[in-house]
Image (spheres, coloured by chain):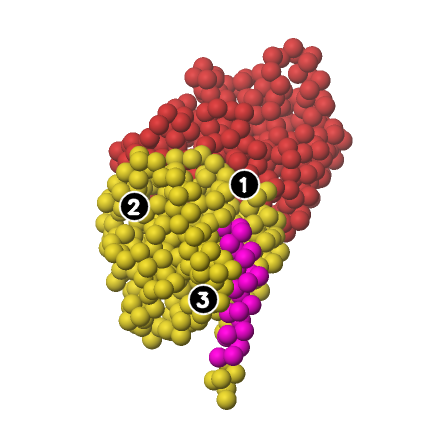
Amino acid sequence: MGDNLRSSRPLAEQAGVLSFDEQVDFCRRAEACDIESVLMAFGFTRPDPVVLSMALGMETSKMKFMVAIRSGVVTPTLFVQQINTLSRLTDGRVTVNMVTGHIPRELGYYGDFLSHDERYARTDEFLTICRAFWRSEGEVNFSGKYYKIENGTVNIPFMSDRTAGPEIFLGGNSQLADEMAVKHADCLWRFPDAPEKLRARVQHLKNNKTEVGLLVSVIARATREEAIRAAQALLQTVGAKSREVQSEVSRKCDSVGVKTNFKLAESSESQWLTPCLWVGAIPYLGAPAIALVGSSEEVAGAIVEYKRIGISQFLFMGWPDLEEMIHFSQEVLPLVRQKEREHELESEVGAGRKIS
Amino acid sequence: MPLRFHWRLLMGGETAGITRAAMYSRVETSLPDLEAQIHFCRCAEESGIDSLLTDFGFSKPDSILLAAALGLATQKIKFIVAYRSGLLGPTIFVQQLNTLSALIDGRFSLNIVAGHSPDEQRFYGDFLSHDERYARTEEFLSVCRALWKRNGDVTFNGKYYQVENAKLNIPFVSSDRQYPEIFIGGSSPPAQRLAINHGTCWMRIADAPEKVLPAIRPALDAGVEVGMRMGIIARPSREEAVRAAYSLIESLAVEAKDAEKENEFVKRSDSTSIKAAYGLENEWLTSYLWTGAVRQIGGPAIALVGSPEEIASAIMEYRDIGVTQFIFSGWPKLDEMVYFGKEILPLVRKKENATARANSN
């Protein structure tokens, strides 16, 4: 949005201020495309997602904002107060995307020097406290390793038709992330792999009443050939320099998911994990560039395949984001809905979209 | 520089004054009330008010988000966003404020306070003592200001905060400043030190000018502005104003349990200003400075009471000792603010002009 190929540029050169008008326009088009929510990512290269969601929320009427947050940057009490304030100002159109951070060097900018596993332990405490506030069962008391709260009270309630606070997404691909999601989240966001490779872990989460969603890019065109040409053209556009940028990101990163994706991209004999799942853009645009590539029919088929193994939400990204989203909504989504009906699958697949 | 006048923002569901005890328990206070608050902002713009104070506390909405919502709906009015250290790291704080600045063209300043209630601090996981909170706030603002300088990566290794090579791609956006004005609240020696080290203006709870002068001299000498937080009860005549003051106390209709809660709050507070305001023995500190509502509404309720002429003169007395900014409140806030803009502000400007002419002759 506004800076669609930002992940191909060095972090320090990514624009911190994006055009607010363009973002409002994107959100309104996403509403028209039946996209349920936009991801408001967190990081030093970006505006603050809580404040930006507030502003975009005032300019939209349906769109929900999935606010990314890391533990370790704000106290849980203040976070709850901010999210509750946001819920009031957007009629409850706010969900939370809990992330643990993946580049230790950037975490240091925010004063966070914990290791990967310690960050998960802190996230556990953070969400325990937040959810205690959201249950609204009186004062919150907590004494942990990372947080201590005494008689915690926040007068502003979370406002929406959900009674127990916002929907909580948790991003991660490690075993710890699975456990944390089961404990605290409504839905785990993870990167895709071939459906049969995901089946067991997805089933485990589903058995524990936790949804699983895929964070994946889309390159869909009228035909498979056009889609592949578009994918190759994308790599031409971003060029070799973006490879250096991303290879540095992957070196500095301690995220299991990011490392796994880079490894897949480097070691796979072909760039295709399935006929539709392409890892070729990862070295250029980062781990979330793992992509469903193909004709509208093929991409819709792949989505429904994931639904069969229990995946129920998708968080998409495209290049350019806006055009890909419109194509998805006009060409791919109707096919998905049709296939869902054909297969008499029980519930409809939710759709999310990454805002960048 | 002409004097600058700010006002406390109307709170959700607020009509006339409410006691602190009631505010702490009413849900309405915690909710943004955009319709009423936007109307209040527009009236403030028309009344010559510079900025509106958005308070921070567990009984209020988040002050950054409230300022963003109101700022997007208005053109000119600025906000004084109150915040405390100990709630979030300095890097994310600057990132949130810079985002706010990009949305409303930097129309805000900060009111950084160290917190006045240890009980409330613990809601947020803050167990530090009064003086430690000030020491932490020193570090907090050091990091914030270093980030605002945008002079390379920021590394800081303090007792309370450590950041390494911190940078933010989003800058502070404003047509006339590199970073927001910083008001520092409090009246203790650590507050004064903090104001001198990091503040652009030291905000104090009011007292008689002759009492204020020695206390603020070090700050003025250090080139830091000084402001007063106080109430205003102005009516066409002094008699009417005094009557309004007393009927305010009656209208607050303090229930016995609220009075008890308030006493308990003060007892448990570790704020030097709050303790001092409650310790004041006289109801009238000067012929125009009244402390009668402090026990119900708190220290900032020390109020200028009188006719527009009397209040304008009182404001000039503060100006004479070096005070340059005021954050006022009134009961009801809106009526008093509009009256101030119409009846008092023109008198103040006239007196300022007369003084300026006298000085240039």
Give the chain letter at badge 3: B
Taking the spot 53% from the left edge, 65% from the top edge, the residue there is: B345
Instruction: Give coordinates of residue A185: x percent, y percent.
Output: 44, 26
State whether residue B244 is above or below residue B187.
above
Q: Residues within 10 Å of mark 1 (few under 14, many from 20)?
A: some
**In this rendering, position of residue A330 left or right of residue B267:** right
Number of the label disc, if any, that sits on residue B310: 3
Instruction: Give coordinates of residue B90: x percent, y percent.
Output: 39, 53
Secondary element under disc 1, as helix, strand or loop, is: loop
- The quarter of the picture where residue B183 lies is bottom left
- Mark 2 and mark 3: Cα distance apart in space: 35 Å
The amino acid on which the numbered mark 1 sits, given as a three-letter code, is Asp
Between A350 and B331, the one nearer to me in the picture: B331
The amino acid on which the numbered mark 3 sits, given as a three-letter code, is Glu
State whether residue B299 is above or below residue A174.
below
Magenta run includes residue B292 = no
The amino acid on which the numbered mark 2 sits, given as a three-letter code, is Ser
Magenta run includes residue B337 = yes
Provide the letter of the chain coloured yellow: B
- Mark 2 and mark 1: Cα distance apart in space: 26 Å
Query: Mark 1 or 3 closer to N-term?
Result: 1
In the picture, the quarter occupied by the C terminus of chain A is top right
Number of the label disc, if any, that sits on residue B117: 2
Mark 1 lies on residue: B33
Instruction: Give coordinates of residue B335: x percent, y percent.
Output: 54, 51
Q: Residues within 10 Å of mark 2 (few under 14, many from 20)?
A: some
Query: Mark 2 or 3 closer to N-term?
Result: 2
Give the chain letter at badge 2: B
Provide the letter of the chain coloured red: A
Taking the spot 39% from the left edge, 43% from the top edge, the residue there is: B250
